[in-house]
Amino acid sequence: MQKTKKKNKFSWLISLAVMLALSGAVILVSNRVAAAVYAPYKSSQEVGFTISSTKECALPGNAADYHVNTAEYGYDASGNLVAYVVETWEYGFNSEEPIVIRSTISADGSMLAGIKVVSQKESEYYGDRIAQDSFQSRFTGRLFPLLLSNESGRGSHIDGLAGATFSTNAVMQAIDDAYRFATEQMTD
């Protein structure tokens, strides 16, 4: 009887050790899985194509719903469809003149190959900053979905411009409009 009592006395300790080991293993594995899932979104990916020619896309009647000005199919030197080039607009701080953005989206819809600020009439300081290559290059090679750095979720987090919330949000919305148009209206 003494032996049974002693065995019961230490069984909780063994159970605790097993539970702690299993919990540690689960945490370790889940952290590694999460890191693998989020890794591609943390930095720019290499854009693996070059557009050699484009062909204009006839805009459907609902193109205005996406704020689309123009849309083109982008082809490589072999004539393969590699991207969609969509020009969209969105109002920023200046509510009279929109910011016009040209977004290049990979043909599979997974990546933003780059953006170009076509025109803007934002305040001199912020407008100049969104038109600079240093701001536009933040978007090159980023996987969709795009999120501002202060938003949570799985996606490519982009640093906005400090103090330029309206302008930054307008650029992000114009890119989102282009993405939705390309994936909903331009694909087969």
Image (cartoon, rainbow, N blue to C red):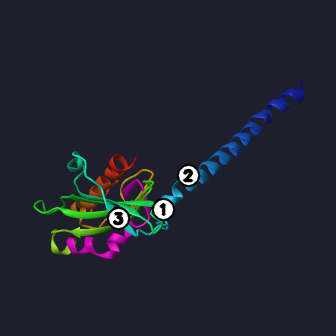
Q: Secondary structure at mark 3?
A: strand
Residue under label 1: 42
Residue 33, compared with residue 2, is above or below; it is: below
Q: CA distance from mark 1 to mark 2?
A: 12 Å
First reached walking from the N terminus: tag 3 or tag 1: 1
- Relative horizontal placement of residue 136, taking residue 13 as reference (left or right): left
Reading the image, the residue beneath label 3 is 54
Give the residue type at disc 3: Thr
Q: Which residues are magenta?
A: 127-148
- Residue 75: percent from left, percent from top: 41, 63
The amino acid marked with disc number 2 is Ala
Q: Amino acid at mark 1?
A: Lys
x, y (%) of residue 176? 32, 54
Residue at numbered disc 2: 34
Q: What residue is rendered at 64% in x and 51% in y? A: 28
Question: Of label 1 and label 2, which has the lower sequence position?
Answer: 2
